[in-house]
């Protein structure tokens, strides 16, 4: 189960991105940390990142802390802000533990179409293949 925190304000991101595109998995959390502390940790740093847009509200929309307390899913206001936060917080030491921050299972980058259960970039027989410039 998860312990849900209510969004700080009810402003919903209007970036047209899916929740999975705005969300990060945060693992290796220190014992005893709560969802509000996770929100504050990310918000304090994210408010200073170039991808933060004050017109979209708070940088963190939601924190879902698993009842084990060892991992959480943090939803940001945009894909860009989540990407910046991933680079900033992955391997950061917090209360003696080194955080693991990555994209959640099922993540598909904006503008790409993913098929459930298939690795990204897997060609499908009978469908046209799109070449990318090198």
Image (cartoon, grey):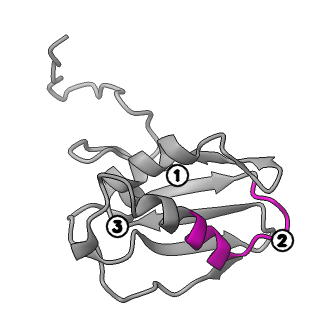
Element marked by disc 1:
loop
Of badges 1 and 3, the one in the foreground is: 3
For marks 1 and 2, give the CA distance.
23 Å
* Residue plotted at (52% across, 51% down): 104
* Residue plotted at (49% across, 41% down): 87
Q: Position of residue 48 (x, y in %)?
A: 39, 58
Q: Is residue 107 visible in this depiction of the protein?
A: no
Quick check: 30 above or below 10? above
For marks 1 and 3, give the CA distance.
16 Å
Quick check: 105 above or below 126? below
Element marked by disc 2:
loop
- Label 1 belongs to which residue? 104
Specify whether residue 131 is painted magenta. Answer: no
Q: Position of residue 105 (x, y in %)?
A: 53, 49
Quick check: 85 above or below 2? above
Q: Is residue 2 visible in this depiction of the protein?
A: yes
Element marked by disc 3:
loop
Whether residues under marks 1 and 2 lie with C-beta atoms below 8 angstroms apart, the answer is no
For marks 3 and 2, give the CA distance.
26 Å
Q: Earlier in the sequence, mark 3 or mark 2?
A: 2
Quarter of the image for residue 127 reads top left
* Residue plotted at (51% across, 66% down): 44
The magenta segment is 29-41
Q: Earlier in the sequence, mark 1 or mark 3?
A: 3
Q: Is residue 102 left or right of residue 32?
A: left
Q: Position of residue 129 (x, y in %)?
A: 18, 23
* Residue plotted at (26% across, 61% down): 17
Quarter of the image for residue 53 reads bottom left
Q: Residue reaching furthest top?
A: 134
- Label 2 belongs to which residue? 32
- Label 3 belongs to which residue? 77
């Amino acid at each position: 189960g998860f312990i849900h925190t209510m969004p700080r304000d009810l402003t919903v991101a209007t970036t047209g991105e899916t929740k999975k595109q705005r969300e990060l998995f945060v693992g290796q959390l220190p014992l005893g940390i709560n969802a509000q502390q996770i929100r504050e940790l990310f918000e304090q740093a994210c408010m200073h990142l170039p991808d933060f847009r004050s017109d979209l509200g708070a940088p963190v929309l939601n924190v879902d802390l698993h009842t084990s307390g060892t991992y959480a899913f943090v939803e940001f206001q945009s894909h860009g802000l989540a990407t910046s936060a991933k680079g900033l917080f992955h391997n950061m030491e917090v209360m003696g533990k080194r955080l693991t921050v990555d994209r959640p299972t099922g993540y598909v980058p904006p503008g790409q179409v993913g098929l459930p259960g298939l690795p990204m970039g897997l060609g499908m027989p009978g469908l046209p293949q799109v070449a990318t410039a090198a």
